[in-house]
Image (cartoon, rainbow, N blue to C red):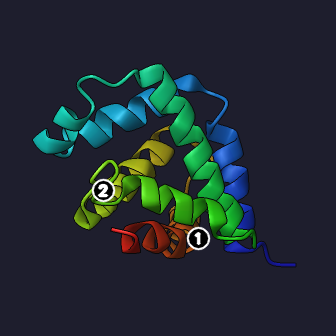
Amino acid sequence: MERSDSDIVFQSYGRCCNNEQFFIDFYERFMDSSVDIRELFTKTDMKVQRHLLRNGIMQLVLYARGMSDTKLRALGKSHDRNGYNIPPEWYHLWLDALIATLRQHDGDFSPEVEAAWNCALTSGINIIRQAY
């Protein structure tokens, strides 16, 4: 029986998410991708932010596994131009930083795992982006 992309992603995330350094490294990489992104986080409690990230990634994974898009629509609303004002073009930087951090922390990372992440998260990220 073949594993689905969402199964591969779920297992990969499980290998990474219990290590706080994974989230620290993600944010360093993400903030390094743009001066504007780094400025966005200057007054942010990063411990709280890392907890929010942990949950946000899980919501994307759960959506890929068949859960409702309700939480992703709420994330989109909070990140739209009237919320955190996250421009849609930043989401590819977010995903690039996530993939690079997964590559660093997931001992079983492979081209198959990378493709699964990209496939599984794209539709959920598009829901969030479209709210802008």
Q: Which image quarter is the N terminus in?
A: bottom right
Which amino acid is tagged 2? Asn
Residue at 30% across / 56% down in the picture?
82
Q: Position of residue 112 (x, y in %)?
A: 57, 68
Who's the residue at 71% across and 56% down the image? 10
Q: x, y percentage for residue 27? A: 36, 34
Quarter-wise, where is residue 72 in the image? bottom right
Question: Is 44 above or below relative to 55?
Answer: above
The mark nearer the N terminus, 1 or 2, is 2
Callout 1 secondary element: helix
The image position of residue 120, as x and y in percent, is 59, 70
* Mark 2 lies on residue: 82
* Residue 71 as seen in the image, left or right of residue 102: right
**Quadrant the C terminus occupies:** bottom left
Residue 107 visible in the picture: no
Give the residue at mark 1: 120
Circle 1 Cα neighbour tier, 10 Å, few/some/many (<14 / 14–19 / ≥20):
many
Is there any visible trace of residue 66 in the rendered image?
A: yes
Seen as rendered, the residue at the extreme front is: 82
Farthest residue, direction right: 1
- Separation of marks 1 and 2 at Cα, in angstroms: 27 Å
The answer to whether 58 appears left or right of 39 in the picture is: right
Which residue type carries mark 1? Answer: Ala
Apparent side of residue 25 relative to residue 32 in the rendered image (left or right): right
**Are circles 1 and 2 on residues that touch, CB within 8 Å?**
no
Closest to the observer: 66 or 99? 66
Q: Nearer the viewer, residue 15 or 60?
A: 60
